[in-house]
Image (spheres, grey):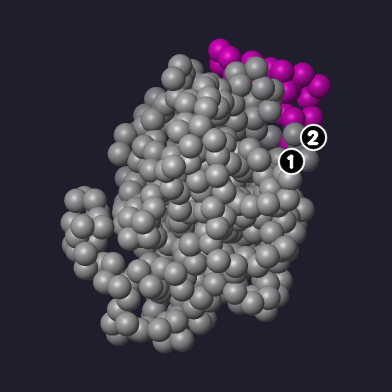
């Protein structure tokens, strides 16, 4: 039921902010990140702007300036406050933003309770039910960003604060993902194996007639020809990535794309973001730690490597004698496995080691690949572009995805801070190739 889903998603955003102090909710640690307070207000502005104002003639905006303060990138809607300066918005206060959320939630509840609400047209081709579902998917994206952004902010604090030291359980209302407590006690993962896929025509994407929700960038479903290929049975681990570092991976230009080499040298990358300790590349696992949402802890050698850029993922793949998968190859694989994994509902809030027999998303038929969903977003080698026949949504909502189809790379599969009911095999995430603050990792591929 849409109204129930609306309440669950909106409540989960509030729950995610509960461990934070008011001061935490204002900070912006870099231009790519946003304050928690802004995330809470922006997602509310979305419902007010794209649902309430258009569906209810009697509705009046909560505050006349909020459209300017909390618009993100919708040029068709109006001017906006500069993104790099969101951290300067000490006003409105966090309490005022909470009142804003309550005001919009009350109005949305009334709208969704109307017998004709879900079918009321608010602009050509877009009705209340669609716009509300889009707003909920949008809010779940910002729930993930809220966590990635506060992690980055806390990493800049010399006090090394933890978002939450104990496993988080506030996401239980959003899904039934199996928690993976105690997995690190099961011994190291098995040796990496390869799952082979035959050449031929395959279909990817979402059919235009599929009634379930999908973003416009997931459509239309179309055919692709793939040569025979293989995908790794599991994700690359921290200890495997450490071997790349120890072998001078960050000092070998032959492994890197030119842009990646220049970016790495300019930013002085020597390890994944949030790795700590180890004065040189020869430092062992025991000498290294990692900063996470649960504070500083010893680096788990068997957990998937995380917080690497596309450039680093691509360099590692070359070093390993492999490559990154295309997004078509990844989706063909993903359609064969159950949609389950280490998502935000598990409470770990970081990738966890996989051990034989413990992956909840066992392949249909019983064999790998594993860790397909959850844990880390998997970089692909595919640039983010429209599918053949892609048509963005009409009106201002057409700016949601299409305008970013340049200078971005596709990631697949979701992460440990993604909601279970937000991800699907056709879901296309995208970020610039130098992005590292997201929960992004590596699965290897090979051509046959």
Outermost residue, top direction?
124
Whether 359 is drawn above or below 118: the answer is below
Whether 57 is drawn above or below 46: the answer is above
Pointer 2 and pointer 1: residues touching (CB < 8 Å)? yes
On the rendered structure, is 12 left or right of 443?
Answer: right
Element under label 2? loop
On the rendered structure, is 321 left or right of 196?
Answer: left
Element under label 1? helix
**217 and 366: which is toward the camera:** 366
Query: Split into 4 quadrants, where in the image is the C terminus?
Result: top left
Q: Residue at x 32, y 76 (%)?
A: 246
Magenta segment includes 272? no
The quarter holding residue 77 reads top left
Crowd around label 1: few <14 · some 14–19 · many ≥20 (10 Å): some
What segment is highlighted magenta in the picture? 109-128
Query: Split into 4 quadrants, where in the image is the N terminus?
Result: top right
User: Can residue 155 be seen in this snapshot?
Assistant: no
Name the residue carrying label 1: 5
**227 and 152: which is toward the camera:** 227
The quarter holding residue 285 reads bottom left
Label at residue 1: 2
């Amino acid at each position: 039921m849409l109204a129930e889903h609306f309440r669950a998603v909106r409540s989960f955003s509030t729950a995610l902010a509960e461990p934070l102090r008011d001061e935490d909710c204002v900070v912006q640690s870099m231009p790519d990140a946003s304050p928690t307070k802004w995330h809470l207000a922006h997602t509310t502005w979305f419902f007010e702007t794209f649902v309430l104002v258009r569906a209810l003639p009697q509705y009046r905006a909560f505050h006349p300036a909020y459209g300017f303060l909390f618009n993100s990138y919708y040029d068709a809607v109006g001017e906006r406050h500069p993104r790099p300066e969101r951290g300067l918005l000490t006003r409105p206060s966090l309490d005022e933003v909470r009142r804003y959320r309550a005001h919009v939630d009350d109005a949305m509840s009334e709208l969704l309770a109307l017998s004709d609400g879900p079918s009321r047209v608010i602009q050509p081709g877009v009705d209340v039910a669609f716009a509300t579902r889009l707003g909920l998917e949008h809010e779940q994206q910002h729930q993930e960003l809220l966590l990635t952004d506060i992690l980055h902010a806390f990493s800049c604090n010399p006090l090394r604060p933890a978002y939450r030291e104990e496993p988080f359980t506030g996401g239980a209302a959003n899904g039934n993902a199996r928690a993976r407590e105690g997995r690190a006690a099961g011994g190291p993962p098995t040796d990496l194996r390869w799952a082979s896929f035959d050449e031929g025509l395959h279909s990817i994407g979402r059919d235009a007639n599929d009634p379930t929700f999908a973003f416009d960038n997931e459509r239309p479903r179309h055919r692709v020809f793939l040569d025979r290929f293989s995908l790794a049975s599991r994700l690359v681990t921290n200890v495997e990535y450490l071997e790349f570092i120890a072998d001078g991976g960050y000092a070998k230009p032959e492994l890197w794309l030119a842009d990646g080499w220049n970016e790495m040298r300019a930013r002085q990358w020597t390890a994944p973001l949030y790795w700590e300790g180890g004065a040189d590349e020869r430092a062992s696992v025991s000498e290294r730690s990692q900063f996470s949402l649960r504070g500083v802890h010893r680096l788990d050698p068997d957990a998937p490597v995380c917080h690497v850029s596309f450039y680093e993922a691509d360099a590692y793949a070359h070093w390993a004698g492999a490559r990154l998968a295309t997004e078509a190859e990844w989706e063909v694989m993903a359609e064969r496995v159950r949609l389950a994994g280490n998502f935000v509902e598990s409470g770990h809030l970081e990738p966890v080691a996989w051990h034989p027999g413990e992956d909840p998303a066992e392949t249909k038929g019983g064999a790998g690949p594993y860790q397909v969903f959850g844990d880390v977003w998997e970089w692909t080698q595919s640039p983010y572009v429209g599918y053949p026949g892609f048509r963005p949504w009409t009106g201002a909502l057409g700016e949601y995805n299409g305008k970013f189809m340049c200078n971005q790379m596709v990631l697949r599969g979701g992460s440990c801070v993604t909601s279970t009911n937000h991800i699907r095999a056709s879901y296309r995430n995208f970020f610039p190739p130098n992005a590292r603050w997201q929960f992004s990792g590596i699965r290897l591929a090979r051509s046959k």
